Image (cartoon, rainbow, N blue to C red):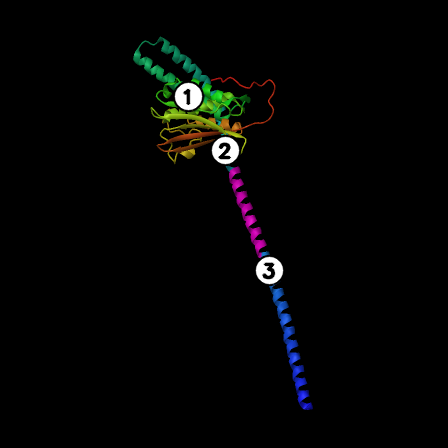
Amino acid sequence: MIPGLIAAAAFGAAFLAVWLWYTHKAERLSQYLEEATKRAAESEGQRDSIQEELFRRLYEQRELDREKMQFQAQLTEYEKYASLAQLALGAAHEINNPLLGILSHLELELKNCEDPAERVEVEQCIAGAKRISSTLRGLLNYARPSPPLLSKIHLARLVVDTIAFLENQPILRGKILKNQVPADLPYVRVDANQLSQVLMNLLLNAAEATPTGGHITVSASKLAYVESIEIRVSDTGSGIPADVLPHVLEPFFTTKQGRGTGLGLSISYAYMRSHGGDMRVDSVLGRGTTVTLTLPLRTEEQPEQESEDSQIVV
């Protein structure tokens, strides 16, 4: 009986040793798995961190490239302005003074001319000389625009005055001109003469593109989430082709085939930018065009001598 107990004890001791060995191995394996899982999590976190840093740097690089392109475009534009300014000053000096003499001589000749055929020729020469003079003035206005003389303006009244000045022009006959500018818009601080010139230019452009019976509409509203006002001049005219639309604000770009200088919209755009505003042209071929002017609402206090409504000099 004693040998059996000894055998059983030996078996139990052996079993306990094996169980302890497996338990120790299991604990070590569990610890190893836990450490491996932790290292894997750390590696995954490092990978995510590296990816996030990579995306951030790629985004920064893309923003830098975009800003670089904008800067290069602005630099090109400034260089173009500088070249135009030099050209305009030289042209004004070298062409305008002799041109005035030519015009004076032609007008004197027209006054003394009795032959109808000769009068037509002289009148054509006078018209050509005046066109040259107008082109020179436009070039000067574009290349070296005068700084805006800001005053507090009631926008609805300025639009009424501008439309009243133009409504009897032959180009507007047979076309329906609508003024939808609300009278309760906030006052804006602008150069009244410059803004009036912009509106006149847009209205005349719209009239040229609009057939008899078509509509030309001036509207305005305060933007909901920014301190700005939008003015829109819309027409139901022929519209602008998609390949032409991106170029309409460029200087000297015109589709009028000898009837325009291509500076009207460029000067208007320069005026809007000098006010801290913007100008956008949207058009659908065969359906019409809308030009949108955006002007900031200036909240700074007005000087006491500044009148609330400035007269428009046209």
Q: Looking at the picture, which amino acid does disc 2 mark? A: Glu
Q: Looking at the picture, which amino acid does disc 1 mark? A: Ile
* Residue on which disc 2 sits: 77
Q: Nearer the viewer, mark 3 or mark 2?
A: 3
- As drawn, the label of residue 132 is 1
Residue 249 place in picture, x, y as percent: 44, 31
Q: Nearer the viewer, residue 116 or 171?
A: 171
- As drawn, the label of residue 60 is none
- Residue that appears at 68% across and 84% down: 9
Judge the density around disc 2: few (<14), some (14-19), many (≥20) Cα neighbours within 10 Å.
few
Q: Nearer the viewer, residue 45 or 142?
A: 45
Query: Residue 216: in sight, yes or no?
Result: yes
**Element type where label 2 sits in the image:** helix
Query: Residue 85: in sight, yes or no?
Result: no
Judge the density around disc 1: few (<14), some (14-19), many (≥20) Cα neighbours within 10 Å.
some
Q: Nearer the viewer, mark 3 or mark 1?
A: 3
Residue 269 place in picture, x, y as percent: 48, 28
Residue 75 magenta? no
Q: CA distance from mark 3 to mark 2?
A: 53 Å
Judge the density around disc 3: few (<14), some (14-19), many (≥20) Cα neighbours within 10 Å.
few
Residue 116 place in picture, x, y as percent: 30, 12
Q: Nearer the viewer, mark 2 or mark 1?
A: 2
Q: Looking at the picture, which amino acid does disc 3 mark? A: Ala
Which residues make up the magenta segment? 47-71
Pick out the residue farthest to the front: 1
Q: How many marks?
A: 3
- Residue that appears at 37% across and 21% down: 172
Q: CA distance from mark 3 to mark 1?
A: 77 Å
Which tag, 2 or 1, sits closer to the chain's start? 2
Left or right: 213 as drawn, with respect to 139:
left
Q: Main secondary structure of the magenta part?
A: helix
Left or right: 147 as drawn, with respect to 100:
right
